[in-house]
Image (cartoon, rainbow, N blue to C red):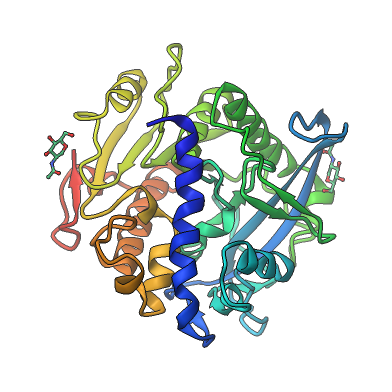
Amino acid sequence: MAKFSFRVLHALSLITLCASAAVSGRSKLPLPAPLGSYSVGTTSLEMIDHSRMDPYASTPQPRAIMVSLFYPTTDTHKPFAPYLPAKLAAIADQYLGLPAGFIESIQPQAHLNARLEEIPDIPIILFSPGLGAAREEYTILFEGLASYGYLVIAMDHTYDAVLVEFLDGTIVLGSPDINGDAQSIDVRTKDSSFVIDQLSNKTFITQIPGIVHRTFKESKIAMFGHSLGGTTTLSVLEADKRVLGGVSLDGPIFGAEEELGINKPFLMFGRDNHTRCNDPAWAEVWKHLTGWKAEITLAKTTHFTFTDIGAVFTEAGLIDSLDPGRSMYGSIDQVRATVAEITYLKAFFDFVLKRGKDTMFRHSDPAFPEITIV
Ligand SMILES: *[C@@H]1O[C@H](CO)[C@@H](O)[C@H](O)[C@H]1NC(C)=O
Ligand SMILES: *[C@@H]1O[C@H](CO)[C@@H](O)[C@H](O)[C@H]1NC(C)=O
């Protein structure tokens, strides 16, 4: 498949489905409740890398990105966060042909600017989205992982992401020229290392609600990404020794650089029947992984099952009318899919960051018959 078509597909998946969601009215659409024992807090931060000019910006300016943090909290009197910032939600409704207020009706489970729970050396998970995707499209996974005691930092790669809203309300549209080539991966990799650098920047840290005196110096870091975000994860694992392991959700989509060599734990988590046995690009990546590695698939899914969208439309009672053949999201129960994704992601991050066991990747679990160990 041509590189460009992944971006188009991603945009189309939103447009076609959201357009017919117009019938749904505007009652709140809560995201699935997180399974872990913590409640979840979230905040969005703007980060400016003064050491790097933005290669995509039309005027000379330092690279600026937005990140969302999702983290455990017990501070539940704070209001729930919006799914998208207000201005972006309104634009996205219009952009996608939705009735005003549809996206605003999506109700995350995370409390906005709630205090971060005091967990010593809280383990950190970095996330990189698919080409053209927005970080918010994976909120269910972030809330799920945060509820198990992880600090999740989800990046938007400005100009690569379809729409980014900065804190002053500036909206930056994605550029159709960004196609997942080596430059895209390079920018995404530098974004990732910059975010990790900032974990020892006091000014940055004090922007995070309720953690003025904290440092993350001893926190262990791992990473995951969807689609091109999986390619990004491989690249970051190779480039940045601070990142200890990674997961690719149904990526990488374009294979690996020939010189790739990674001896850190890596999980390839594919859609239905997408394995190294039938994807030469995956076989190539597999060969270059010299550390702990595993590959699993999730039955009855597609590339886009790994975003929130199918689950949101299921919660809205609209999945059958919006995706009747389930060619876009797959025939799996979409909310159940998020449970399986979160459970196996948690097992991997527990293994890499919390000295957990890797049993779930060695033996199939009767509780998750839809997961195949390849
Ligand atoms: C530290 O963080 C602040 C706030 O985000 C930022 O303005 C500053 O440039 C950062 N410092 C470095 C060295 O990156
Ligand atoms: C899995 O993929 C292979 C190769 O692409 C194909 O031959 C096979 O029919 C697929 N199996 C299922 C169950 O879709």
Q: Quadrant of ligand 2?
A: top left
Where does the image place residue 351, in percent across and percent down from the top left?
Answer: 37, 45
Residue 171 or residue 20, whichever sits in front: 20
The residue located at (51%, 29%) in the rendering is 237
The residue located at (47%, 64%) in the rendering is 140
Instruction: Answer left or right for 186 relative to 361.
Output: right
Where does the image place residue 223, in percent across and percent down from the top left?
Answer: 50, 41
Is 12 placed above or below 266 here?
below
The residue located at (50%, 60%) in the rendering is 15
Viewport quadrant of the N terminus: top left
Instruction: Answer left or right for 198 relative to 32.
Output: right
The residue located at (56%, 71%) in the rendering is 98
**Whether residue 145 can be seen here:** no
Residue extending farthest right = 60
User: Which of the 4 image quadrants contains residue 352?
Assistant: top left
Where does the image place residue 231, in percent across and percent down from the top left?
Answer: 47, 32
Is 54 placed above or below 173 here?
above
Where does the image place residue 64, in percent across and percent down from the top left?
Answer: 78, 42
Residue 87 or residue 66, whichever sits in front: 87
Residue 335 or residue 105, whichever sits in front: 105
**Whether residue 41 can be seen here:** yes
Is 3 placed above or below 96 here?
above
